[in-house]
Structures are given as C-alpha cells and as structure tokens.
Amino acid sequence: MSATTPTIEDRAVDVWDGRVTLHVKVMGSGPPLLYLHPAAGLAFDPFLHTLAERFTIYAPECPGTSPGDPHAIHQVDDVSDLVLIYEEAIRKLDLGGPPIAVGQSFGGMLTAELAAHFPGLFAKIVLLGPIGLWRAEAPLANWIAAPPTDLPAMLFHDPSGPAAQAMFTLPEDPEQAVAAQAGLVWALGCTGKFCWPIPERGLHKRLHRITAPALIVWGEQDNLNPVVYAEEFGRAIANSRVEIVPDCGHIPQVEQAETTLKLVNDFLLE
Amino acid sequence: MKVSMFSQVPYRRLPDDFEQRYESVVTTPWDLTEPEEVHASYRDALDQLMAAARSGFDGVAFTEHAQSSYDMAPNPSLLGSALAYATDAEGLDVAIYPMGRSLGKTREPVRVAEEYAMIDAISNGRLMAGFPVGLPYDASLNNGVPPMELRGRFEENLPLIRRAWSEPHPFPFNGTHVQYPSVNIWPRPIQQPHPPVWITGIGNPATMQYCLEHGYGFNYFGWFGATLTSRRIFDRFWEIADQMGQPRNPYRMGYMSVVCVGETDAEAEAEYGDHVRYFFNKGLGSIPLERLALPGSIGLPGLRAILTDPGDFGLYFQMRTATFPELAEAGCAIVGSPDTVAERLIEIATEFGIGQMLAMLQVGSMGRELTMKNVALFAEHVLPRLKEVHREEDWDNHWWPERLGGVPLTPERTMEATA
C-alpha cells in the first residue's frame, strides 16, 4: 500500500441541464478508472489509494452527498434520472475512451445499471457486493433503518477487527464528529432514495444487456447482501467471472483488501 | 381558550416486561393481544371521547399511527366518521379533529381529501383537518415512502387536497409523486373554501414557517416533557411569527398534554401513576431513535442541530425506564388535584400563548372507569377555568369551524385585517 497521500482534485461537472453539479474526485495517474461509491458516501480507502498508483481514479459523488450541496438530491427523482446524470457526466469528463468502472454495493448497482443502459460505456466492470437484486428467500438487511449499533455486524464478518473498528471511529473533535455523523446519515438518506423500501428497481430485467467483461466479487459471509446473488449476477452477465472471498462480509475492498486487490488487478491486467 | 379531549387507542394489557423485550412499533408481536381487549380498546376510546363531547369540551381529537401498540389507529378517519355521526345524532356541537392524516405517508392524497370531506359532511361542518408530515417509521417503514420524499410529498399533497376541496370544476393533476387525470370529489366539504387546517410538529423551524406562511394552526405534543421543551418550541414559533410580521394570535397554537385529575394531588398520583408510567415506558419510550430519525427524513442542517443540541427531545432518551416522579418532574404528564392541574395548564397557556388545549385524559393502561372519572373531574373543575383564558383578549379564532364560532380566513378577510 502507498505510504504517501496523493492529491485529490475536485472536478465540478455541470449536468442535467444545469440543475445538478456532479462533483468528481480525481486522484492518481494512468488510464481512467471510474469508481462509484457505496451508500454511505465516498471515502478514499487504501484499496483506492493502491489502484491510484496505476490508474487515474474518477469518483463522482452521488448528488446530495457533496459538502455544501445537500439539496442536489431533490433534482433526482429515480434510478433512471441518476443513470442519465452519471452517463452525461462521464461523457463530459472526456476520458478518451471507455473507462474501467468499479462499484461497491450501491455503487455496484449503479455500475451495473449504467453498463446495462449503455453497453458501450465501459471497457470492463468490477462489481463489489452489488445490491439491486431481491429474492423473497434471501432478503437484504435494511441498512438504512438499522440502529447504528447493528451496522458493524451487518457490514463485517469480523466486526471487532481493525478494518471494522477504523470505519466506525468518529473524529475526536466534537464539531467534526457531528459533521461526520450528520454527513453519513444524510448520505444514507440520499442514496436511500434509490433503494427504499426494497433495493430492487428491476435490474434483473436489464443485466443481460451488459456486454462489458465483468468481475463480480462477493464476501462469503455478507450479512447485508447474501452471497446467493453473486451467482445470479454471474449467470445474467454473459462475459463475467464470480469470485467469492472467504472470511469476508459486505465490503471486500476493506475487510479483505489484499485478496480483493489481487483479484481486481489480475482481472484488469487480463 | 378552546379545550378538546385527545385520545389514542392503546393496547392496555401489554406484559410487565414489554419494554425490556419489544419495541412499541413496527415489529411488536401481535400475539401479545387478546381479541376482546382489542375490541374494548376501540369501544372505550370512542365512549370516552363521546363522554367528553357530552361534558362541554369544545372538540374531540385523535391521531394516526400504523403498526403501533400504543395507538391502534392506522386510519383516524374511521374514528372521525364514527364520532361525527354519533355527535351529530345527539346534537353535540363539538369539533371533530383528526390530528390527522400524515401527508408524507399517504400515497393517495385525493382519498384523504375525500375522507375528510365525508367527515365534514357527516358532522355538518365540524371537521378540523389535521395534517402532520408524519413520523418516519410510519411513513417509511409502514408505508414504504423513501424518507427523503416525506417533506416533498407533504408539500405536494396539502395544496392538492385544498384544491380538491374547493375547485368548482374537474381538474387534472400532474405532480412529482402523484398524477390524477380528473379530480372532482364528491362530497366537497361543507366548510368552504376549506375546514381549518392544523399541522402538528415536533419543533422543526421549517414546519413552523410553513404553517405561518399558509395561515395554518400549529400544534405541539408535550410528551417529551413540557418543563424541558415548551419554552424552546413555543418561543421558536412566536419568534418566527414576529419575524414574518404575524400577530401572536393564541388560537393558532395548540398544545397537547397528558392530564390526570384526582381529588387530591396524592390521590391522583396513586391512581394514575402506574398508567402514566405504562404509556411512557411501553409506548413512546419504546420507539427506538432510529424509528424516529430515518436517514433522509431530517435535512442536513436539522441533523447537525439535533446532534449538537438534542434538547427538543426532552426526556425521550430516558423514557423507556423513567419513573413516575421523573416523568411528572419533566412535565410529560400533569397529574394532581383539580386546582393543581388547572393552575398549571393556565400557566402554560398564558405563558406560551396557547389557544387550544388538548387534554389526553386516557393514558397507557388506564381503564374505562378511571378514564371516565378523569373526564368527569376535568369537565367539572378544570374545563370552565380553562375556557376563560384569553377571553378578554379579543382575538378572532381563524382556526376553528365557523359553525362552532370560528372566523375563517378568506382572501377578503386576512389575519392582518382582523388582528
């Protein structure tokens, strides 16, 4: 993992006929890699820092989750709006060719939606525990309605491990702690607009449209989004490979960072 | 001052260890109940409100809560229509006040307009139309509305309902959340252009401002502890009114409190204490915070304000285990002799400019007999004194049905003109 902290640039992209400014964080150097963040908002973790050594990461923030612009979410009514907003932003970023796309959980669903709506948009896609499917016998846990104390066990196979502990430690400064908590809750509300009450908006009908080569990575002990869906993603996307990560919950890139990095790197080098 | 009786429809025989084992909403197991107790809850609640209607109260009020053990009232219009008919049949001139249908929750706003119009027609113009934004657990968990949409739906639905009530011709409606090809409801309300509209809030300044901008009444529930929260809430409301240049007309402000009247202070505490504790421990105190504050339901500035200063929540965080003395001390309930209760309520109404007092006279496990006694003692000793409050001040009451002495606001008769 990288010891230095590379600079992160904020690129504001006006989309949706000027009603939304999508803030895209840009970091690293190399070919373009689009990263779509999970429901809790964008965080640059060691996984991304390492990828930034070989790729230029473009990480758009879901409307509403960018600091100072919480009301942007009210310009986006549904998944269809969101997909069009992201597609427009990707075009306007002018990346010089189809980028790789990596999405985690909520971001995985959005990556799959984009790839299904616009089959030529991405060179390859990596879906890390993507939500978006629902079967009655394997309901997803409701992370938006859960008490905060339930989240570690919902997100991690080992909630007492260092990865989980680091994620749930608040800043010591009280003002920063309030800002962090409020920002997290608001981000869950913003992304929740596209997941509530059931995080299923018909993606299963569209997955077959995906033509980009796909890697699907899933934590074997995912308590939020059961691993049974990995197989369904793999079956529906023609050119895909499924990798199940042992001793791992819902966030493979954090809980099993090295294993996940190797899987992703190998796939991207193919 | 106008004085109404407020009641919920609680299940009154929950087990002693309920609050250690269950939450009071959403997941509460139905197999804790007995059918005859469920029936008795409704029969007694309606009988008790009718007793109040016969005893000189100005109105009868009730709420909407679905999947809730402390208030089995998923649709308050059903209670309202029963009371509208029964009071009309007996010639009782009381306001019928569902406090009301949550407009963040409903996916059928025209249905709500129709139900309220029916109650107004059945009661011959005695409806007071309550429209809260709604509690997140009820709107979002019980009815599937994304928490982020609650306020947007509320702000779309209320003008649509107003229009459905008063527009003379059929109209199509193309909203963000609902679409209708033709709205032309039968019946329209008796009260035109609309029955008095009231919004119950918990202290969000945006809701207060909305009420003031649109000329609606604002109602506050004192459950979190009047001693802890009243000054914050009511000062906030009147300061916003001042900033907007609106008069401090008390009749636009409602206040709901648990009230228990005994012969003496000691007797009241002995008779009512356990029932009060039951309500706060097993009811309100057993609604976990995450049910009341779902992500998306509170805006970012509001979140920061609550995290920095949770004072608007009063005693809520201790409520699941609070003792009766703690609850009484915080003002969650006003319990005592007729003099004690009357003096405290008059003090609150005078100090905070309240023109409608809503007395919750059945609480928690309180049975029919004791509730009827509470209603009778309140009606005989407290009610006449409360009615005198604000009498000398000469305000018009724009938030009360015209048939019952209200003075409706119309384009021709604005608040400024009558202040």
Image (tube, coloured by chain):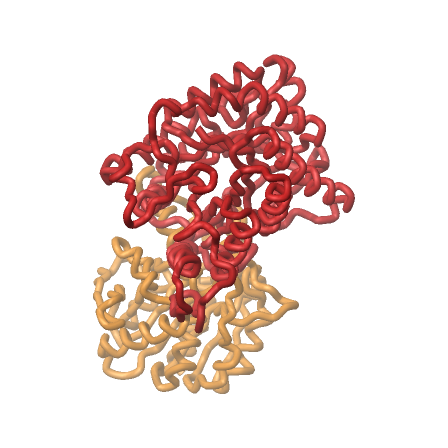
Chain colours: A orange, B red
Residue A178: give x, y in percent of width and height: 35, 42
- Residue B12's place in the image compared with A191, above or below, is above
**Residue B70 appears in the rendering:** no
Residue A61: give x, y in percent of width and height: 32, 63
Q: Residue at x 25, y 39 (%)?
A: B416
Task: Please identify the quarter of the rendering in which residue A67 is found.
Answer: bottom left
- Residue B118's place in the image compared with B49, above or below, is below
Q: Residue at x 70, y 31 (%)?
A: B367
Of the 4 image quadrants, the one containing the C terminus of chain A is bottom left
Frontmost residue, B16 versus B138:
B138
Compared across the picture, whether B180 is left or right of B214 comes to right
Task: Please identify the quarter of the rendering in which residue B325 is found.
Answer: top right
Frontmost residue, B268 versus A36:
B268
Of the 4 image quadrants, the one containing the N terminus of chain A is bottom left
Residue A41: give x, y in percent of width and height: 37, 58
Question: How many labels, in total?
Answer: 0
- Residue B34's place in the image compared with B376, above or below, is below
Residue B137: give x, y in percent of width and height: 52, 50
Compared across the picture, whether A95 is left or right of B21 comes to left
Q: Residue at x 44, y 22 (%)?
A: B388
